[in-house]
Every structure is written in structure tokens, then in C-alpha cells.
Image: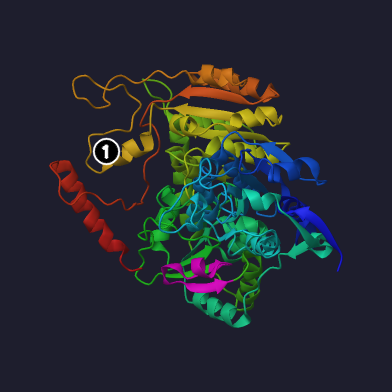
């Protein structure tokens, strides 16, 4: 057996450089590169390997460990999980900064490889700088925190263990049902230890992403269920995109006349103006989708994990005989809400179901005029929101409406948290698949800027716009600097509404007067944050980072700023002051947020009683 003597870190880089995936006879390199921030836990291990070994991996210097993992996640999501980045950090705080982003990747079922440095395996220098010691279990380090948010976790304490760990990592990263964050903890001494690795370990390895078909018996059961129903509705989730099944979805909906509602991850499966696209569903849904969902006797869920926002906390479907048919590659997702499970690839399942339903001449009983009427009513409502004026300044919905016209169809918007995801899900008008990139499986504040950078890496020819609130921007915007460093222009559309207004609105809806959610000075009278709004000059701050900046307070100024931003070659930020509370509200939906059972506030007590009565409707599941 031929061998080559390499350090464990060198062997890891050499292995990652030879990983490929193939789907539908199309092959591509799986790891585009490595994001990294170096410290004493990885600089002389992984850092040395990246510097001196021959490889084709692109190295990108991160500015915040969480931010760089968000960028890697966004890249993989935009690439429909067929390409990704690895992320390397030092030990201790550098590693722990990735935990939040690991949860984001795993919650969204997106592959990303995390390589945190770890304390010495030999333990001779212990305790080293940034090492956490557990007196009850000395094998535990800070990196054990990744176990809860990783789909696969391993610690490599000997260089030869890499061979098993690396193959297991690829097994999970390339599994459409089980993918997510994979964490390989790398003790800093082991990274630099040499071993005689077999040459075969570094040969080109192609991982075949074969589509999982549904067994014919399951298809027959699903067909019988569909045939017994007159008013089905389809919920399109992110799995439709990852399966490249948008054309099959359109064909299925048109052939059997079934309306399609979209989750955050599924939005853009259909053009916004398709006659069977009834819009967003659930808590952040449209009136058209939510009304049809209430009347549906069958919910065909495709590639969605049926989270509480998509199901209005399981209250969206109220027909006395409603049933759920769930198509998903993940068995756990497919069985949710007591559904009939079709554990299969979305494209395969839709094709099989379509063939059988054609054979039995199935057609839904939906009234075409009713679907059209609901859509027209909703589009009039969106037009009203787009035109909404406010005496105190720009309304959020007016700004979104203007942006929907200004940005152009060949662009991508990115979002994640605050009130913007609700507004964008309801009223943003998508034209083609993947022009809408929302991270809402974790709804992680701070994803927006980093995510826009990741999307730009995936879509270098397109203009990418981060829809970002001031709260999210303050929380994490470090990769804005990286975008300039890498020459990857992104555009930050900063909606400044003076705080965490989404939660401020939610809080007041549950009986509160409003507490701790706005960016105000502390009041001398109350001792609370009830003073004047804090004036934060976001444009000047971004300009100091090297960003082209604009501040707007009128629609005319916004139009001019967007026009100029399109001409720029480096990253831009447009600061827009919007009036707090001018976002959209719920449309025929409900979200369960438990309210204090006892309180000194009568409003809170009343809100608790309303909550209890609403919960009764959702107990079926």
C-alpha cells in the first residue's frame, strides 16, 4: 500500500479538495473553499496546510466567526446544497462564536463543515490560553457545545482518526435528509502531527446524490387519498428548490388545478402572478392562502418541515375532515401533523403522483373564479400597502413596494429576522426561482449581511440586496468588510425603525405597554428606556468601513440612491428611516405566544384568556 506522510491538517485539506457530488449526471466540486480566522488553535495546523499544500480551495478571511459560517450557509443554500465552504477557527471564544451559526445551518438543513481548533490532546501544556476546564469531566471542552446543533460531531485525537471522521462528515453533508452543520473538533497538537496516510484516501471521490423514489405502494395510497378530496392545497417548501422540482410543481398544480401556497424557504417556486400561486401561508401569510387553507380538506406538504409559522401554530387547517399528505426526503419531517408520509425526493414523487392521477382522471373541485377572486383581492391589498403614505415619514410597506419595482427581476434579496421577513413573505413579488433568499428556519438576527455576501459568492453576476433592520445590522455586519476585501459587491438596504420593533409589536399585542425593545435613552423619570430615540448615523459608520453610503427620507431620494448604487462597483449601504409600526399585520392567521397566566396588568390577563381560547383550535395535532 502506497502512503504519503502528511500532518493531519494537510491531509484534511488534501481530502476536502478531492470531494465532488453528482446529481442528475452533473458533477461539481463540493467544497468551494475555506473561511477562516486564525488563532493559536489553528494557525500552525490548518493555516500551514492552506498556505503550503497544493489545492484549489479558495481561502476567505472572515471578520467574525459567526458571520463567516452564515456566509458559508447562505452560499450552500443558494447553490441548492450542492456546494459549500468549510470554516476554521481557533479554540475557545473563536470556536464558540460559530455555535449560533451552526444552529442556523442545521435548522435549515444546509450543509456546512466546521473545523474548530481544540485544546491539546496530549494535555501537557494544560490549561492553555482560552481552554475551559471541567473538573468533573476533563474530556469536555468548549467544542462540546456544538453537539446540540450539529448533525455529526467528532473530535480527532489521533491523526489516523481523520480517515473515519472525514468520511462520516461527507456522509452527512451530502445526505439530503440528514444534512446540516458537521463539526470536526481539531486539537491543536494533533493538527500538526504527521501520519503515513494511504494514497487512496486522497483520490477523487464522487458522492452520488441519487434521487429517492417513492415505492409504488405508497404512491397508490397517496393517490387514493388525493382522489377522496375535493379541495386540496399545496404547501411548497424549500425542498422543492433543493430537488430542482419547480417545473414539476407548476405542472402538477396546473394539471390537477390545485392552488399553491409557499413557505419562506419555498417562496419563488412559482412566479408571484401565476394564477395558482395564492401567496405566502401561515403567520406571515396572505389572506388568499390562509382562507383556502382553512377550507382545505387535504394539505399536500412538499419539502417543508411544517413549522409553526407555516401552520399558524397548527391552527391553519380547520376543515372537519382535513388530512395531511407530506412529501419529504426526511422521514421525521414527513410524519409531522399525523400526515401520510411519502418519504421521497420531491421531483420523483410529483412525477409518480402525476402519472397515476392522470390515469384515474383526477381533478380537484376548486372553483377557478374563487381562487382568482381571492388572488385579486390580495393583490389589491398589496397594492394598497405599497402605496401607503404616513404623515411622519416613510412607511415600511411603501419602501418595500418601491424596492420591488426598482431592484429589477435579475437580483436576489436576502433576509432573516425582525418584521421584514413577515412583510417580504407576504408582499414581495418574486419572479423566478432563487430570487428570494430568506433564512427563517432559525430566523437568526445578523444573518442578513453575512448571508448577502454568501449569496454574492454563489451568484457573482447578480445584484444582491440584504433587507436588514437596524437591530440586525448592529448585531452582526462584519462580513461587509470581507465583501470589500474580496471585491464582491453587496447592497445593504437598512430599514431604521429605532429598535427591535417586530418584538415590540408582538409584546404590545400580548398586553404590554412596550418594554425594552426600542433604541431609546434611559429616562431619568422612569429609569426605563423611555427617553428619546438614539440618533445612530449608520451611513457614516458604514462609510468609515469603505462602503458607498446613502441616506434617504423620501421616495424620490430612494429612487436616486438605488440608481446610483447599481452603478457602484463596491458594496453599498442605503440608510432608510422608516416609521415604527408601519409593517404588515396578520391576515387570517394566528401564532401561539404564551402569555403570563397571572399579572398585575389587566391587559395581560385579558390577552392570556384570548390565547387559551385560540389554543383549543390547534389541539387536533
Q: Is residue 359 visible?
A: yes
Name the outermost residue toward the right. 2
Indicate the position of residue 108 as horizontal and vertical percent values. Answer: 54, 53
Instruction: Using the rendered view, name the quadrant where residue 560 is placed.
Output: top right
Instruction: Using the rendered view, name the quadrant where residue 525 is placed.
Output: top left
The residue closer to the viewer here, 505 or 531, is 531
Name the outermost residue toward the front. 124
Q: Is residue 532 left or right of 40 when viewed as pictured?
A: left
Q: For the C terminus, give its image quadrant.
A: bottom left
Q: Is residue 186 above or below residue 211?
A: above
Instruction: Using the rendered view, name the quadrant where residue 59 is placed.
Output: top right
Indicate the position of residue 546 as horizontal and vertical percent values. Answer: 62, 20
Q: Residues within 10 Å of mark 1 (few under 14, many from 20)?
A: some
Q: Is residue 615 left or right of 384 when viewed as pictured?
A: left
Indicate the position of residue 505 as horizontal and vertical percent values. Answer: 32, 37
The residue closer to the viewer here, 280 or 58, is 58
Q: Is residue 430 visible?
A: no
How was the colour assigned to the protein in this rendering? rainbow
Task: Please name the residue that numbered disc 1 is placed on.
Answer: 508
Is 333 within the magenta? yes
Q: For the N terminus, give its image quadrant.
A: bottom right
Q: Secondary structure at mark 1?
A: helix
Q: Is residue 226 left or right of 191 when viewed as pictured?
A: left
Q: Is residue 65 left or right of 231 when viewed as pictured?
A: right
Is 241 within the magenta? no
The residue closer to the viewer here, 169 or 230, is 169
Indicate the position of residue 286 as horizontal and vertical percent values. Answer: 44, 48
Q: How many marks?
A: 1
The residue under the point 21% across, 19% down is 524
The residue under the point 36% across, 51% down is 589
Span colored in magenta: 327-343
The residue under the point 48% across, 56% down is 140
Amino acid at each position: 500500500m502506497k502512503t504519503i506522510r502528511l500532518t493531519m491538517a494537510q491531509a484534511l485539506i488534501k481530502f476536502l479538495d478531492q470531494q465532488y457530488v453528482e446529481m442528475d449526471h452533473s458533477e461539481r466540486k463540493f467544497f468551494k473553499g475555506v473561511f477562516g480566522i486564525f488563532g493559536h488553535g489553528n494557525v500552525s495546523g490548518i493555516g500551514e496546510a492552506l498556505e503550503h499544500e497544493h489545492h484549489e480551495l479558495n481561502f476567505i478571511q472572515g471578520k467574525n466567526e459567526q458571520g463567516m459560517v452564515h456566509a458559508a450557509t447562505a452560499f450552500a443554500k443558494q447553490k441548492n446544497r450542492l456546494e459549500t465552504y468549510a470554516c476554521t477557527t481557533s479554540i475557545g471564544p473563536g470556536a464558540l462564536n460559530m455555535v449560533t451559526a451552526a444552529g442556523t445551518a442545521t435548522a435549515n438543513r444546509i450543509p456546512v463543515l466546521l473545523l474548530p481548533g481544540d485544546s491539546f490532546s496530549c494535555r501537557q501544556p494544560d490549561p492553555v490560553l482560552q481552554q475551559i476546564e471541567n473538573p468533573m469531566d476533563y474530556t469536555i471542552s468548549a467544542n462540546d457545545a456544538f453537539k446540540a446543533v450539529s448533525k455529526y460531531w467528532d473530535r480527532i485525537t489521533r491523526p489516523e482518526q481523520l480517515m473515519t471522521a472525514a468520511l462520516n462528515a461527507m456522509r452527512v453533508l451530502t445526505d439530503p435528509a440528514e444534512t446540516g452543520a458537521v463539526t470536526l473538533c481539531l486539537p491543536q497538537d494533533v493538527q500538526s502531527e504527521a501520519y503515513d496516510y494511504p494514497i487512496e484516501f486522497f483520490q477523487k471521490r464522487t458522492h452520488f446524490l441519487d434521487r429517492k423514489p417513492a415505492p409504488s405502494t405508497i404512491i397508490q395510497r397517496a393517490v387514493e387519498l388525493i382522489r377522496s378530496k375535493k379541495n386540496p392545497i399545496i404547501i411548497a417548501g424549500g425542498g422543492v428548490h433543493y430537488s430542482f422540482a419547480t417545473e414539476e410543481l407548476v405542472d402538477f398544480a396546473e394539471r390537477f388545478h390545485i392552488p399553491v401556497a409557499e413557505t419562506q424557504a419555498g417562496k419563488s417556486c412559482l412566479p408571484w402572478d401565476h394564477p395558482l400561486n395564492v401567496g405566502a401561508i401561515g403567520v406571515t401569510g396572505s389572506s388568499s392562502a390562509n382562507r383556502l387553507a382553512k377550507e382545505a380538506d387535504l394539505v399536500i406538504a412538499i419539502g417543508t418541515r411544517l413549522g409553526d409559522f407555516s401552520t399558524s401554530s397548527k391552527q391553519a387547517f380547520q376543515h372537519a375532515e382535513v388530512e395531511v399528505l407530506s412529501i419529504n426526503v426526511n422521514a421525521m419531517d414527513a410524519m409531522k401533523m399525523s400526515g401520510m408520509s411519502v418519504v421521497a425526493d420531491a421531483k420523483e414523487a410529483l412525477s409518480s403522483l402525476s402519472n397515476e392521477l392522470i390515469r384515474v382522471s383526477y381533478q380537484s373541485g376548486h372553483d377557478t373564479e374563487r381562487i382568482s377572486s381571492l388572488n385579486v383581492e390580495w393583490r389589491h391589498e398589496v397594492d394598497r400597502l405599497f402605496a401607503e403614505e404616513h404623515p411622519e415619514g416613510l412607511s415600511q410597506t411603501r419602501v418595500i413596494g418601491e424596492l420591488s419595482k426598482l431592484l429589477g427581476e435579475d437580483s436576489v434579496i436576502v433576509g432573516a429576522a425582525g418584521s421584514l421577513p413577515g412583510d417580504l413573505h407576504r408582499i414581495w413579488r418574486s419572479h423566478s426561482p432563487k430570487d428570494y433568499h430568506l433564512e427563517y428556519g432559525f430566523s437568526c438576527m445578523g444573518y442578513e449581511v453575512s448571508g448577502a455576501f454568501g449569496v454574492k459568492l454563489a451568484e457573482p453576476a447578480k445584484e444582491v440586496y440584504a433587507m436588514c433592520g437596524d437591530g440586525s445590522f448592529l448585531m452582526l455586519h462584519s462580513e461587509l468588510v470581507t465583501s470589500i476585501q474580496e471585491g464582491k459587491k453587496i447592497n445593504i438596504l437598512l430599514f431604521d425603525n429605532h429598535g427591535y420593533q417586530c418584538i415590540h409589536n408582538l409584546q404590545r399585542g400580548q398586553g404590554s405597554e412596550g418594554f425594552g425593545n426600542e433604541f431609546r435613552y434611559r429616562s431619568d423619570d422612569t429609569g426605563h428606556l423611555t427617553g428619546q430615540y438614539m440618533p445612530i448615523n449608520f451611513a457614516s459608520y458604514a462609510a468609515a468601513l469603505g462602503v458607498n453610503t446613502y441616506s434617504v427620507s423620501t421616495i424620490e431620494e430612494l429612487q436616486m440612491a438605488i440608481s446610483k448604487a447599481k452603478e457602484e462597483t463596491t458594496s453599498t449601504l442605503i440608510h432608510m428611516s422608516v416609521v415604527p409600526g408601519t409593517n404588515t399585520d396578520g391576515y387570517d392567521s394566528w401564532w401561539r405566544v404564551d402569555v403570563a397566566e397571572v399579572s398585575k396588568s389587566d391587559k395581560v390577563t385579558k390577552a392570556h384568556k384570548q390565547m387559551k381560547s385560540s389554543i383549543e383550535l390547534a389541539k387536533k395535532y
